[in-house]
Amino acid sequence: MKPTNGDKIFYTANYIFLTLVSLAALYPFLYVLSASFSAPEAVVTGKVVLFPVDVNISAYVQVMRESSLWLAYANTVFYTVLGTAASMLLTVLGAYPLSKSRLAGGAIFSFIISLTLWINMSGSAGMIPFYLNLRDMNMLDSRFAIIIAFAVGTFNVILMKSFFGNIPEAMEESAKIDGANDFQILWKIYLPLSVPSLVTVGLFYAVARWNSYFWSMILLKDPHKLPLQVLLKKLIVEMNVEQMMDTVDVVVSYSKETLIYATIIVSVIPIVLVYPFIQSYFVKGMILGAVKE
C-alpha cells in the first residue's frame, strides 16, 4: 500500500521528534565524555559543548592510580555477579510454579506478590521497618545483606511467569510421560526455550545491581565494602576528591570536575560494552514476555 501524503508527513514529523529526543538523552553522556578528555580550564570556562577542547588524559591517569576506586570497582563487580545469579535463581524458582494452573492457591500467591509491587511503588513507607529487620538479623555492614536482601524483583517474577505461561503445556506433558520430574522439565525444556526472557530479566537485575547505591550507603559502614556508586556519590555530591588529587598536578593537568567526569565514564564502561551484545535478546524478551497477562 502506497503511503499517503498524510502518512509521509506523520513519519517525517515522528522521525524528527524521535531524533531530537534521542539527542537530548544522549547529550549529557557526550558532554561528560568530552569534558573528561578536556583541559580543566576549558571545562570551568564552559568552552566544552560537544567535543573535547585541548585534549587531556591526566584525569584518567589519576583515576587509574587510585586504589580506592579499583577496590570499589571490585566490590561492585562482586555484588553484581553474585547478586544477579542469586536473583535469577530465586526468580526462576518463583515464576515457574506460579505459571502452573495446577498450583494450589496460585491466584492468591500471584495477588500477594503483585501487592508487594504496588506497595513498593507507592512510596518509602517500608524503608524503616526493612532497615530494622536487617538490623535485627545482624545483617548491617554485611556483603550478604546486599546480595540477598534485594534478590527478588516483583516485576521480574511477573515477567518470567508470563513467559513460562506461554510455553505449551503439551511439551511438559510429553516430558512427564517419559518420566521427567518438574526440576528436569524446568532445566531441560523451560530454561532453554526462555533464553530471551532470561537475558532480559538478567539485564534488569545486573543494571539495578550495578547502579544501586542508596541501600549500600545505608547498610555498609566499612569503606572496604563500599561499591562504586557510593564512591561516585561522595565524589559528585560531596565533592570529596581531595584524597584523589596530587596538589602539584591540580592546576596544570586536571581539576575536580574532570576527575569526576573521568570516574563516571570509567564506571559506566561495562554496561555500555555489554548492552549492544544482548540488545536483540532484550527486545525479544520484552515482546514475548508481554504477550500474556
Image (tube, rainbow, N blue to C red):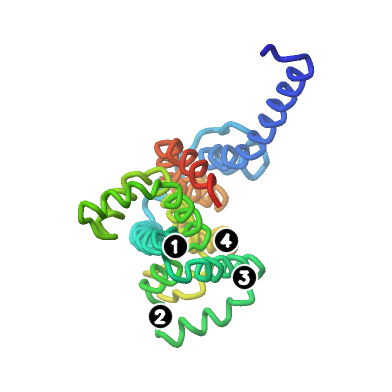
Which residue is found at the position 57% from the left and 37% from the top? 30
Q: Which residue is disc 2 drawn over?
A: 139
Marks 4,2: beta carbons within 8 A: no
Q: Which mark is residue 239?
A: 4
Is there any visible trace of residue 247 in the rendered image?
Answer: no
Q: Residue at x 35, y 44 (%)?
A: 193
Mark 4 or mark 3: name the one nearer the start of the chain. Answer: 3
Tell me residue 175's x, y (percent).
Answer: 26, 51
Left or right relative to 197: residue 10: right
Disc 2 versus disc 1: nearer the observer: 1
Q: Is residue 212 above or below residue 286?
A: below
Q: Is residue 206 above or below residue 270?
A: below
Q: CA distance from mark 1 to mark 3?
A: 20 Å
Dot 2, how many residues are within 10 Å of its Cα: few (below 14), some (14-19), or many (20+)? Answer: some
Amino acid type, mark 1: Leu
Which residue is labeled 3 in the image? 119
Q: Which is more toward the observer, 125 or 177? A: 177
| Residues tagged 2 and 3 counted as in contact (Cβ below 8 A) | no
Q: Nearer the viewer, mark 4 or mark 2?
A: 2
Counting residues from the start of the chain, the first of labels 1 and 4 encountered is: 1
Residue 88 position, x and y percent, is 38, 58
Furthest-front residue in view? 177
Image location (x, y in percent) of residue 57: 45, 40
User: Which amino acid is tagged 2?
Assistant: Met
Give the amino acid type for the residue marked by disc 4 in the picture.
Met
User: Going 46% across and 56% down the picture, which residue do you hit?
Assistant: 161
Numbered disc in front, either 2 or 3: 3
Q: Earlier in the sequence, mark 2 or mark 3?
A: 3
